[in-house]
Amino acid sequence: MTFNPDADISGHSTRRRGRGAAIGGGAVGLGGIAVLLISMFTGVDLTGLLGGGGGAPGPAPTSEALLECKTGEDANTQDDCRMAGAEVVLNEYWEQHVDGYVAPSMTVVEGQTPTQCGTASNAVGPFYCPPEQGVYIDPDFFQIMRDQFGASAGELAQLYIVGHEWGHHIQNITGVMEQYPNNGTGPDSNGVRMELQADCYAGAWLGDVTELKDDQGVPYLEKPTDAQVKDALNAAFTVGDDHIQEQSGFVNPESFTHGTSEQRQYWFANGYKNGLGVCDTFGVPGDQL
């Protein structure tokens, strides 16, 4: 899914922040990438399990506005601007669907930066930090997914991932996180249901997104191709608990926190085809998740 080149995305508030030095240094093996993808979407910093990243602390992180991100063409050619464009469209979508909507902050990370939920970096992956109501994404993570885990991580897949994190923000501001607190792991846990609902929210947004237009009436995004939809489904498959655990040779459903690859693909596709009305994963019996 690509942005219309003439679409106006200048209304974003995305900022770039970081120290410019990634955690761990060097390539990450399959054991490490499993840790990274488990961390992905959780807001929990597990990078201490990876080793590396030692030494004296660097300078304090700097923050700057992405002033260069003004048009859909910028979003199509620069990963940072694609994140900024996604912010604009996500906010417009959720303003239409949540009364009293309050937008999260959006930070593009370069290297690493501290947050209230741990260190944001390309190692940890994209995440939502509830105490800050903030989404953190290092676009370099998409290349890690391609190079070290076989994901295609194209444009629509990237938007799915951003939309998933926005889904957690919606759960936070609408009280879902408070109503269904963490009750451990397992295929029927609140954590799995929370993640699958965020997948469904991302699908619902992307299913309707071509209807959203800028102030000049230009649609922000072009209709996705079949290949792009398959790419997003590939990303959902890649971050399934069973697929991640298979890399270590042992699949334990009782330790699941995000859902299987099949579930993640199903709930993304369900939202994409049928909209927000089908996204109540907490009202579905466990054997129907």
Image (cartoon, rainbow, N blue to C red):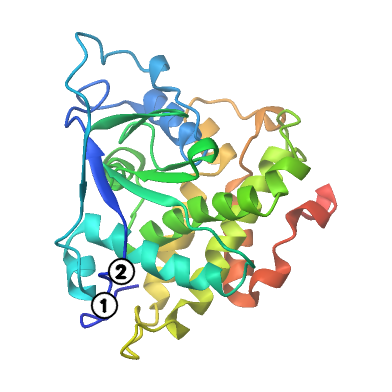
Residue contact at pointers 2 and 1, CB within 8 angstroms: yes
Q: What residue is at 54 percent from the left and 66 percent from the top?
A: 203
Do we see residue 110 in this rendering?
no
Mark linked to residue 8: 1
Disc 2/disc 1 C-alpha distance (Å):
8 Å
Q: What residue is at 75 percent from the left and 60 percent from the top?
A: 280
SS at mark 2? loop
Residue lying furthest left in this view? 68
The quarter of the image holding the N terminus is bottom left
Relative placement, left or right, of 201 versus 10 is right
Q: Quadrant of residue 77?
A: bottom left
Pointer 2 local density, CA inside 10 Å: few below 14, some 14–19, many at least 20:
few
SS at mark 1? loop
Q: Quadrant of residue 258?
A: top right
- Residue 55's x, y, as percent? 20, 8
Q: In the image, what residue type sits under mark 1?
A: Asp
Q: What residue is at 47 percent from the left and 32 percent from the top?
A: 39
Mark linked to residue 11: 2
- Residue 124's x, y, as percent? 38, 32
Pointer 1 local density, CA inside 10 Å: few below 14, some 14–19, many at least 20:
many
Residue lying furthest right in this view? 285
Residue lying furthest top in this view? 55
